[in-house]
Amino acid sequence: MISLLLIFKFGWGQFNIHFTNSEPKTQATATTDTGLFSKQQFNETVDHFPNFSQLIRETQDDEEYYTMNDFAVQPCLLATRTRNGDNGKTVMCTTMVPQGVTVAGNYLLTTAYDGVGKHNSVIYVQNYQTHKLLKTIVLHGKPHVGGITYDPQSKEVWVCGRQYGQAATFAISMKAIQNYDDAKAPLIHYNQKALLGYLTRASFITYHKQALYVGLFNARGRGHVEKFNLKKDGSIAGENIGKATQRQWNAYSESVLQQNVLTQIQGIVYYHGYTILSQSFGSGQSKLYVFKEKPSGGNYRPSDALTSIETPAHLEQISASHGRLYMNFESGSYSYRHRSPDNVDRIVSLNLQDIINQAKIDGKGGSDS
C-alpha cells in the first residue's frame, strides 16, 4: 500500500498498464502498414489545435505544402508479426502500442509494445523517403520501449529498456538491422547493454553531441533527465560489469548531468540552442514546450518556457532530423482509438525552424501545468 501511494504521489517509475480486453483476431500473416483514418478525419483532428494545424501547413520557404499524405503511416495499428513473450513462438499481435520514433540514416524507425503484455516489443523499419515498411524487428522481452535514438558516429540505434530491475538502454548496430531476417523473426542481437545510474526507469531518450540524454516520465511530479557520455567508438562511458566480448559490453554508467523537467514528459529534443519537450498523459490534449537549452545544468520549469503548442492527445516520443520534428502518437492503437477524442495514425513531422520562430515571437511565458 505504501509503495502504491508513493507511485501515485511522486510518479516513481512509469505505469505499464495492461488492458484486460482480448486481442482482435486477424487474417494477416505479416505486419501491416495500412492507415486507419481518412484525410478528412485527419484534418478534423488537426483543426482542433490551431497552432499545431498552422505548423503542419506552413514551411520555411512556403514552397511546399505538407498534408497527411506526406506523413508515414504508423505500422502495427492493425497487426504485427512478433513472438509470444512466454513460449517464443512466432505470432500475430493486434494490440501493439506505438511509442518511440527516430530517423537513422535512410530509415524511419518506430517502436511499440504489446498493450496486453503477451508479446515481445518491436522496432518497425520504414524507408525514410518512401515510408515503405521494410521489416519488423523483434526485441528481447516486453520492454515499454518509450524511446529510441540514433548515434550517427557509431551507427548504432539505442533503445530504452529495463534490466535487473533498473533503467537500462540497449544498442543495436545498423548492420544488424540491415541484415535482419524479417521472415524468420529472430530476436535481434544487442551490441551494447548499459544500466543507467540512479534512474528507476528509462522512459525516453535522445542523442545529442556524442551523449545520450535519458529521461524518467513522472505522472504526478517533475520528470528527470540525465546525460551519459559516449566514447569515440560509440560505447557508453561506464564501469564494466560483465564479461567483455568482441561485440558486446555490459556497463554501469553514471550520469554527468542531471536536470528536472516538467511533469508527464514523453520526449526531448535539442536543436540549435533550444530544447523541446513533449508532454502527454491520458486522453487530454498534449503539448510541445520550447525552452532555451541549458547545457551546463539547471532545471526546465514551466515558467521558463518560451512557448507551448497544444497537440492531439497521446503524443509520445519526439525526435529531430533533417530540420524536422518527428512526432509519434499512440492514439491509433487498439487500446486507445475507441476512447480517444483525437486519433492520429501518422508519424507527423513539423518544420523545426517554424517552431523556433514561433517561440521567438511568443517570448518568455507558459503555464504552470
Image (cartoon, helix red, strand yellow):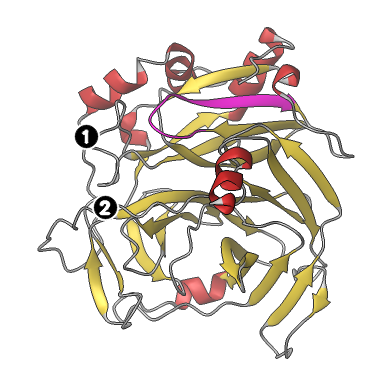
The location of residue 237, given as percent across then percent down, is 82, 68
Task: Identify which residue is drawn at 80% across, 33% down.
Answer: 299
The location of residue 363, given as percent across then percent down, is 72, 10
Element carrying mark 1: loop
Closest to the observer, 305 or 37: 305
- Give neighbour class at mark 2: few <14, some 14-19, many 20+ (Cα, 10 Å): many
Q: With 130 as the anchor, is 353 left or right in this view?
A: right
Which amino acid does the dot numbered 1 rest on? Answer: Phe
Q: Is residue 48 visible?
A: yes
Reading the image, the residue beneath label 2 is 33
**What stretch of residues is rendered in magenta?**
280-291
User: Is the residue 315 above or below the residue 16 in the image?
Assistant: above
User: Is the residue 265 above or below the residue 231 in the image?
Assistant: above
Reading the image, the residue beneath label 1 is 37
Closest to the observer, 257 or 110: 257
Element carrying mark 2: loop
Q: With 301 as the anchor, is 182 left or right in this view?
A: left
Q: Is residue 283 magenta?
A: yes
Q: Is residue 207 magenta?
A: no
